[in-house]
Image: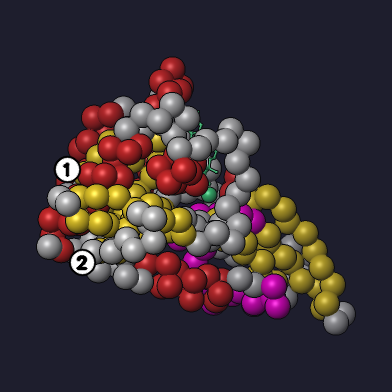
């Protein structure tokens, strides 16, 4: 049987990053299994998928890591001071990032709990914050370094119909460069190009950003399978040329 004795020459770890719902998991499903789902659930638990392919007569195993939801961090901070009104802003967030705000009573004290789902880099705790037992901020830090460890490639994904997801690219890049190897190959991806009439990010804006930051750039559609194979293969070949 062909697969049984297959010799792997290289294993390349590639990470997917970007705001929630931009299509990271569907890009991976399309690349690894040629599948797509319109009602994809938020990724839970799955750490990576692999695809074995040939580059230059060598067998390369691409190990593509998908975020298990840590791109949207649940911030659950208690705030014990103040009477009747939480003083100041707990976290530097836009109003619309907050999904719930409620008051909880723990051991007689009034706690103002600010519960929201936000891109992880927006969650900057301040000295005024009191951590609740459910706080996931500390856990997130540990997950982050494990996620980037050993990565030789990264797909930085935004949704071309959502300007904010593109505006966040600089922050994701900053986080990536803070954690990953300095020779990491990075591809900027504008996904959902099948929704052309809803475009909110001109190709030129993305191209300019990619050139300035020295990234590869492609527009893709996981739904229509446009440029997905090509985007992953470009990154893998580039990694191959650097490594071999
Ligand atoms: P993630 O949170 O970044 O992993 O995003 P998902 O892969 O879960 O996708 C979020 C939503 O966008 C799902 O409803 C997908 O079906 C949809 N989606 C993903 N890729 C595309 C695409 O290329 N075109 C369109 N039209 N929808 C997409
Ligand atoms: Mg996902």
Q: Residue furthest top?
A: 197
* Residue 135 at x, y percent in the picture: 64, 72
- At horizontal 41% and vertical 73% (from top left) the residue drawn is 145
Up-down relation of residue 205 to residue 10 (above or below): above
Residue 190 horizontal/vertical position (percent)? 36, 36
Q: Is residue 168 left or right of residue 111?
A: left
Q: Is mark 2 within 8 Å of ligand 1?
A: no
Number of the label disc, if any, that sits on residue 182: 2
The residue under the point 40% across, 35% down is 191
Task: Tell me where residue 59 sits by quadrant.
Answer: bottom left
Q: Quadrant of residue 8?
A: bottom left
Left or right: where does residue 241 sit relative to residue 45? left
Mark 1 secondary-structure assignment = helix
| View extreme (front): residue | 1
Residue at point 77% right, 59% down? 102
Left or right relative to 80: residue 240? left
Q: Which residues are magenta?
A: 116-134
User: Percent from the top left, x then y, of residue 63?
Assistant: 37, 59
């Amino acid at each position: 049987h062909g697969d049984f004795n297959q010799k792997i020459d290289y294993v390349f770890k590639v990470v997917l990053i970007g705001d929630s719902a931009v299509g990271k998991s569907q890009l991976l499903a399309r690349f690894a299994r040629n599948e797509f789902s319109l009602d994809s659930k938020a990724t839970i638990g799955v750490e990576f998928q692999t695809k074995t392919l040939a580059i230059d007569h060598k067998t390369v195993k691409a190990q593509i890591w998908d975020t298990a939801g840590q791109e949207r961090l649940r911030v659950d901070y208690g705030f014990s001071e103040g009477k009747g009104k939480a003083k100041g802003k707990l976290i530097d967030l836009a109003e619309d990032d907050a999904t719930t705000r409620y008051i909880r009573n723990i051991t007689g004290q009034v706690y103002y709990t600010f519960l929201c789902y936000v891109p992880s880099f927006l969650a900057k705790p301040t000295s005024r914050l009191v951590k609740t037992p459910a706080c996931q901020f500390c856990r997130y830090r540990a997950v982050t370094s494990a996620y980037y460890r050993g990565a030789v490639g990264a797909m930085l994904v935004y949704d071309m119909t959502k300007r904010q997801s593109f505006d966040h690219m600089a922050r994701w890049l900053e986080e990536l460069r803070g954690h990953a190897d300095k020779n990491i190959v990075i591809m900027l991806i504008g996904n959902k190009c099948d929704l052309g009439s809803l475009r909110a990010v001109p190709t030129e804006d993305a191209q300019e950003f990619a050139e300035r930051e020295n990234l590869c750039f492609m527009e893709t559609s996981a739904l229509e399978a446009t440029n997905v194979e090509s985007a992953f293969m470009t990154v893998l070949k580039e990694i191959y040329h650097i490594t071999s």
